Amino acid sequence: MKIAFVGKGGSGKTTLSSLFIRHLAANEAHVVAVDADINQHLGAALGLDENEAAALPAMGAHLPLIKDYLRGTNPRISSAETMIKTTPPGEGSRLLRVREDNPVYDACARTVRLDDGEIRLMATGPFTETDLGVACYHSKVGAVELCLNHLVDGQDEYVVVDMTAGSDSFASGMFTRFDMTFLVAEPTRKGVSVYRQYKDYARDFGVALKVVGNKVQGEDDLDFLRSEVGDDLLVGIGQSDWVRTMEKGRPAPFELLEADNRMALQALQNTAEDSYELRDWERYTRQMVHFHLKNAKSWGNEKTGADLAAQVDPAFVLHEHLSEPSAAQPA
């Protein structure tokens, strides 16, 4: 399942992403984690030291490789240079799977060993001084969107994406790429403001959204969140001595995380698993095509000098069965 964590800056989004990833690994799930935030902190939250986190390869720097690999033998894509962040797969395209080795993972992913297992970690890469005035961060996140467009995953497989803060996620169609979106909100008016924006934007696209209350100190905080977000409130997570220790660089074994917080993480996993039964691959593919055509008309055709609408394969529907070993893939 594809899971996104969103929220305003400082809400604890990255911390909760990392706790959920650790929880999944402890439950023996197969996990690909992606740091798609402009502030690249997921690696550190998963226990990497400063040098290890800085050494993570940037997906944006490997975009030509990603495009060339995913293009495969798709006859509708004349060259990797004509692929943009929204280019959908079609017959002949190479697809990504959670449990496989491929050139994209070789270049862009690193294995991170946690207390109870290991995960693959990928990162868009930081916004650097050379980007100032000449690029926007969404050009880097485009590598993530392209990979998600070509990714098929099963019930016991997770792709967990720590998204950029606030409503910037709506600068592209990537917000529709997930089975479940967890919005992290503090019990304050500012904390729920991003929820209102997200709810309004996501309503027309059937985005499954649940709110995770963070830094909850008591029933009054939960009552406030319920009054603001209603049934979208899934669970509240309180202050954590384990997290404070981890943020000081001295993490205790994950099994020592407070019982209430472990139960809250299990509630997130249960909700994610429930969303699996509601998957609609035809809608997923249709939305992918919708945003591709929109981007093609807005800027893609002019930038590439090609008619990018011709990249759409009308007979192709991305589906889980394409992840089966018997499904044809170009060599």
Image (cartoon, rainbow, N blue to C red):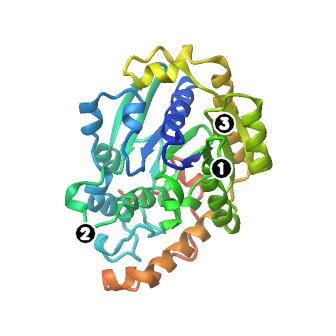
Q: Secondary structure at mark 1?
A: helix
Instruction: Tell me the crowding category of disc 2: few under 14, some 14 to 19, or many 20 or more residues within 10 angstroms, Cα based.
Output: few
Q: Is any atom of residue 270 visible in this view? A: no
Question: Which numbered circle lies on residue 268?
Answer: 3
Residue 187 image offset from top left, x and y in percent: 66, 41
Q: Which residue is mark 1?
A: 189
- The quarter in which the N terminus is drawn is top right
Q: Answer above or below: position of 263 versus 291.
A: above
Q: Answer above or below: position of 138 versus 59.
A: below
Q: Is any atom of residue 49 visible in this view? A: yes
Looking at the image, do the residues carrying marks 3 and 2 touch, with CB atoms under 8 Å apart? no
Looking at the image, do the residues carrying marks 2 and 1 touch, with CB atoms under 8 Å apart? no
Give the distance between the C-alpha atoms of the residues marked 3 and 2, in whole angstroms.
Answer: 39 Å
In front here: 201 or 108? 201
Instruction: Judge left or right: residue 279 versus residue 168.
Output: right
Q: Name the amino acid type tagged 3.
A: Leu
- The quarter in which the C terminus is drawn is bottom left
Give the distance between the C-alpha atoms of the residues marked 2 and 1, in whole angstroms.
Answer: 35 Å
Instruction: Tell me the crowding category of disc 1: few under 14, some 14 to 19, or many 20 or more residues within 10 angstroms, Cα based.
Output: few
Q: How many marks?
A: 3
